[in-house]
Amino acid sequence: MKRAFSRSPKRQGARAIVSLIMMAMVLSTFGAATSLAQSTPDAGTPEGATPSVGATPAADAPDIPSSSFGTIDGEDVTLWTLTNAAGMEVKIMNYGGIVQSIRVPDRNGNFTNVALGFDNLGDYIEMNPYFGCITGRYANRIALGTFELDGETYNIPINNDPNTLHGGEMGFDKFIWDTIPVETNNGIGLQMSRLSPDGEQGYPGNLEVTVTYVLTENNELRIDYLATTDATTVVNLTNHSYFNLAGEGAGSIFDHELMLNADNYTPVDDTLIPTGVIEPVADTPMDFTTDEEIGARIRNSNFEQLFIGRGYDHNYVLNRPSPDDESLILAARVHEPTSGRTMTIQTTEPGIQFYSGNFLDGSLVGPNGQMYRQGDGFALETQHFPDSPNQPDFPSTTLAPGDEYTSTTIYGFAVD
Ligand code: GLA
């Protein structure tokens, strides 16, 4: 699908302010501003995040610097810059909710951008392998683009032959989200929302979605997801940032040390759909229960799962005290020895997809002017398991009217 875009940044003036105020009024009228305080756990502050359009009138919204990042189909794309007192800086745009850059210090206090991405909107529109974006309505794969709910069969686009990947052809990563700056207990941020209409990409139900990004004073990027529906549907939301803790464009991530809090994973068939079996990682190259270099075993073709995935492209089953536990737990820790940077990921989700950038092939160029080649970045996507709508034994991704889908993930940055 061809979309009209302009690379030339245009300043946004009074029009943007007026539309923000109107957006806030519309959202509060329709009650989209459910307080996240009741529904989301919080690592450090027990009261949780309290971003809400209703509680934060547009007039009191924090002043977050923004600039135009171009236009798509005549609509402005805005890029906001969140900064905390420690100097950490995160840039996020309303197109796809894409996190364009994350600047964090190394052990000597030198800041660099550790998120893969592009320096222009055109590349995001034309060739983005999901860098930084919100993925939905169903993150990861659904087998053969079909599932059943309450006896009805639904067909969704097959965009990763023979399966559906990350929602379909027009997933949540390809829309402009209504965005307002917010101030929360945890820091300043951006609240993004959109109504995914009934039938969009074939999914049932009008789905109201709110994704709130917050940069905390503890060098964390926190993401809270909230969704409600008016008809039974399936939902699985995540952020698809790729990282290289030595800096985007710095080359391979094979020397990064990874810990995954998962004794089990879901093996896949040769189309990357889970077989349905939950397998222990022990005594296999899938085992990251203690710190291991990502590249140490990645070329082991004797281990069929690595051969199928061309490396790691697997959902890990996070260790939880019980299957219905949804507390915020440590899911992953990554350490880059040269810079000393570490990243931790906490989540309320049951799974995490570890993807070692296997499909990067040198055809994409990052903001530093460096090509991204295979293994130059990794993604750790907190999520429900792939293909859950077709896998009755996996945690359910069904959302019914009256219920709330909530999810929280916190990426924390530090140095050793
Ligand atoms: C996910 C998938 C991978 C790949 C990337 C995007 O992580 O699991 O197979 O499709 O998205 O390239």
Image (tube, helix red, strand yellow):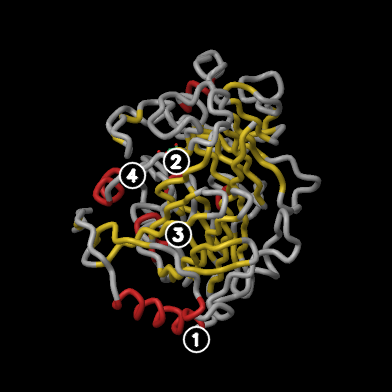
Spatial CA distance of label 3 from label 4 is 27 Å
Give percent across and percent down for residue 79: 36, 58
- Around disc 4, counting alpha carbons within 10 Å, would you say few (fewer than 14), some (14 to 19), or many (20 or more)? some
Q: Which mark is residue 154?
A: 3
**Reading the chain from its start, which is encountered first: label 3 or label 4?**
4
Residue designated by label 1: 29
Between the C-alphas of marks 3 and 2, the distance is: 35 Å
Q: Secondary structure at mark 3?
A: strand
| Kind of residue at badge 4 | Asn
The residue sitting at 33% across, 28% down in the picture is 361
Residue 141 visible? The answer is no
Mark 1 or mark 4: name the one nearer the start of the chain. Answer: 1
N-terminal of the two: label 1 or label 3?
Answer: 1
Q: In the image, what residue occupies the spot 45% across and 59% down?
A: 154
Q: Quadrant of ligand 1?
A: top left
- In the rendered structure, which amino acid carries the disc numbered 3? Tyr
Q: Residue at x 67, y 52 (%)?
A: 348
- Which comes sooner in the sequence, label 2 or label 4? 2
Residue for badge 4: 128
Q: Quick one: SS at disc 1? A: helix
Eye-nearest disc, 3 or 2: 2
Q: Position of residue 45 (x, y in %)?
A: 73, 60
Look at mark 2 in the image and give the residue it sits on. 115
- Dot 3 and dot 2 residues touching (CB under 8 Å): no
**At 69% across and 33% down in the image, what residue appears?**
264
Local packing at callout 1 (Cα closer than 10 Å; few below 14, some 14-19, many 20+) is few
Label 2 vs label 4, nearer the camera = 2
* Badge 2: residue crowd in 10 Å (few <14, some 14–19, many ≥20): many
Q: Which quadrant does the C terminus fall into?
A: top right
Q: Nearer the viewer, residue 47 or 266?
A: 47
